[in-house]
Amino acid sequence: MDIVLLVVSFAIILAGAELFTNGIEWFGHKLELAEGAIGSVLAAVGTALPETMIPFIAIVFGGGIGASEVGVGAILGAPFMLSTLAMFVTGAAVLLARKRRANREDLVVDPLVLGHDMGYFAVAYAIAVGVAFLPGDFILARQLTAIVLIGIYVWYVIGHLRAEAAQEAELAPLRFHRLDRRAPSHPAPPRLRIVSVQVLVALACIVGGAWGFVDGVQGLSRSFGLNGTLLALVVAPIATELPEKLNSIIWVRQGKDTLAMGNITGAMVFQSAFPTSVGLVFAPQIWSVSGSGIAFASAGITFLSSAAIILPMLARRRLDGRALLVGGLFYVVYLAVVLASLAGGHV
């Protein structure tokens, strides 16, 4: 039953994330935001919601050490998957579609904008991981750090909205457009009312799916006697990061490279602030390197993979699909470490 619950929860989470992303893009269009702001802020928040809701529900409503371990694993696993597997999948998509793309293997992005995103991520995530090295009874320091992280993200969003000039963006039809009989058919823009309805329905799907997923992961961890943190670190993000991966593939094929990469880097900034704040506030004792060394080691891989991709891009002032493939190597290395730890019973 746990496997069935996981599969059903995956489907609900992904359906909700797709609805949310589609709706939030139209919402951004009505606000006359540019493609970069929509990708790095609105779409990134939408696709990051599944992995945000999982630790929130696990830690706040799950109760107990086991639920908190699932939450901490999901928090650490999300940026790890984006900096490794999501980057690899996007790079592979570029290479596979290069014959149909005007710029072949090159991604049409502004390196400075991506560097701006990753700079905010590096600072916020370094602060969040840094407090994990403090003694477990430093609870107030962890809670104050959460406030700092939220402030960093708010400043990041303000900067994006100020820097981007409004421009038209080609959007897919609103999924709920046909339900609004008073509105003209696509390509006429939908009314704000039906856009809001779609976003609320999507949020309900994401919350419900995340709740079921937490129960499924905890059930599997009990059945196999495995550490819930590592199950959530390896299993949960593969499913919950699918919205980012699938959206990036679609946007790469459409030549919307700014959306494809902004969706990933923007989600990483969001995850370095909000999900980590949940762990710092509601599970301060669990947010510690001493209790989850292997899990927190994923943060080191995240920094290494991000640096291996972003620093050469900034030096060359360009980004190509092959450069993103290095993320897959870091993912395989860490996966081997996790499997070795599980086999050796060190976790």
Image (cartoon, rainbow, N blue to C red):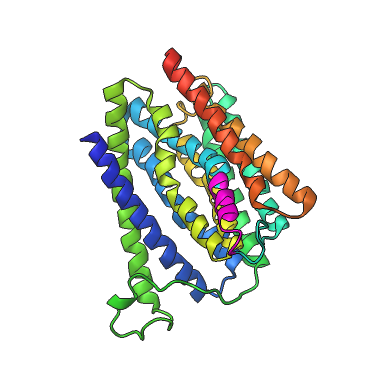
Q: Is residue 154 above or below residue 9?
A: below
Marks counted in the figure total 0
**Residue, far left:** 1
Instruction: Judge left or right: residue 146 versus residue 165.
Output: left
Residue 327 x %, y %: 60, 40
Q: Is residue 6 visible?
A: yes
Instruction: Judge left or right: residue 156 versus residue 51.
Output: right
Please say whether residue 214 is one of the residues in the magenta stretch.
no
Q: Quadrant of the C terminus?
A: top left
Q: Which residues are magenta?
A: 87-100
Residue 96 x %, y %: 56, 54
* Secondary structure character of the magenta stretch overall: helix
Q: Is residue 136 visible?
A: no
Residue 15 x %, y %: 34, 56
Residue 77 x %, y %: 48, 36
Which quarter of the picture shows residue 329?
top right
**Residue, far front:** 99
Residue in the image at 54% along x and 26% along y: 138
Q: Nearer the viewer, residue 133 or 20?
A: 20
Residue in the image at 45% along x and 27% along y: 286
Please say whether residue 95 is one of the residues in the magenta stretch.
yes
Q: Quadrant of the N terminus?
A: top left
Q: Is residue 94 above or below residue 186?
A: above
Residue in the image at 51% along x and 40% along y: 81
Residue in the image at 52% along x and 32% along y: 140
Instruction: Judge left or right: residue 90 versus residue 50.
Output: right
